[in-house]
Image: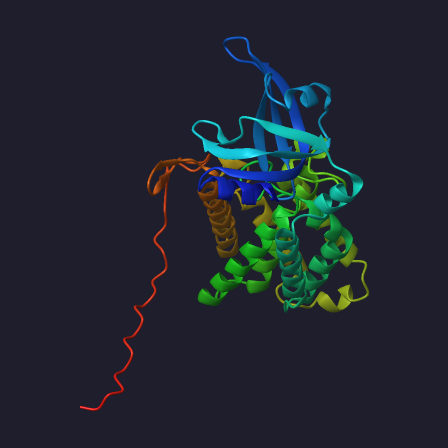
Amino acid sequence: MDLLPILHLKRAAADGRIEARIHAQIESLTRKDTREGKPFYAAVLADAGAKLTLRAWSDGPAFEFCEQAKAGAFVEVAGEFTMSPGFGLDSKRWTIRELNPDELAELLDGPPDIRGKQAADYAFLDQTVRGLADPRLVALCGLFLDDFGDRFRRAAAARNNHHARRGGLVEHVAQMMRSALAIASAYPALNRDLLAAGVLFHDCGKLWENQMPVDGFMMPFDERGELLGHITIGIEVVNTLWRRLQQKPEWAGWLPLDPACEDVRLHLLHLLASHHGELQFGSPVVPKTPEAWALHYVDNLDAKMEMMSAGYAGSKHLAARIQEKVWPLPGNLVEPLGHFHPAPSAPESTTGA
């Protein structure tokens, strides 16, 4: 059987039955009973890119292992997988065993494609913010990446809805940055440096709220994240780094700059505070500047595109080109229109008239 990341397994199973192996961490293991009283375990498995839930039935080969196993164990699961109506990715009879140390080390490194993409995304972010024109924002972004770069690389962008994986925040922020730079080119009145810094910092509180450990894929709950939320934490992070800027020898030379230093700080904080767009979605204020609206829409766009991508990969088909909706999107997914490809030109005749 081929060894596949969970995300690749979901895509392959959407096209039919597939025999495969996965390496993952048991995020949770819950014993349940059917209405008829038949016992089973619901096992939530996670790797660097995705999660899945499998049921180990009492008459199946995995049930005995689940009786002894605990959340946090690293395992190999092997079996025949299908997309089951009402359950998503499923396997009736699957086997499970613990990983050996070499297999565990390889799993924690992540699949090469995800690892490579996230490394390229992080390098792009680093190069972009260190190349801004405003020296105060360059220094602020540099402090953040220097102090929290490793933590940033491990954080997820969300617990469930989008980019909910180790390193997902880097992917989300990098794609937002690409969109923001394009929008700043289309709307030159926007403060490009401020918008770029807002993209980098908008979810920086998730380095605590949605942090992944060094040695696993189980996202713990964080008391700071629960009590304050990522927007409040992010504002605290920016203010703390800004106070460090004021201690730099360059600070005196920045004081005469236009716009004023305090205005730059306040406008950046507004981007963090308003990026959810509406009070009912957790922002303490609504967007009140062009850059704040641009950041909000770029954030929302990338989240929705990721939700749709994950939905196409993992939701069941309701008809030939229609798939079941994924929460929180409001409707079923319809297969997108493919890219236009011109018809090949007919070869020119080489015969004479």
Corner quadrant of residue 194: bottom right
Q: Is residue 26 left or right of residue 318?
A: right
| Left or right of 89, for residue 245 | right
Task: Spot the residue most to the top.
Answer: 37
Q: Quadrant of residue 128?
A: bottom right
Is the residue 277 above or below the residue 242 in the image? above
Q: In the rendered view, does 87 fall on the left or right side of 128?
A: left
- Asked whether, in this view, residue 250 is left or right of residue 298, the answer is right
Q: Is residue 111 above or below residue 46?
A: below
Q: Residue at x 27, y 82 (%)?
A: 348
Residue in front for this viewpoint, 218 or 30: 30
What is the residue that sits farthest to the bottom in this orientation? 352
Q: Residue at x 60, y 41 (%)?
A: 1
Can residue 12 be seen by looking at this rendering?
A: yes
Residue 275 lies, with reference to residue 140, above or below; the image says: above
Q: Where's residue 99, x and y in %? A: 74, 36
Residue 92 placement (x, y as % from top left): 53, 26
Q: Nearer the viewer, residue 60 or 204?
A: 60
Q: Position of residue 228 (x, y in %)?
A: 67, 34
Figure colour scheme:
rainbow
Q: Picture coordinates of residue 19 (x, y %)? A: 55, 38
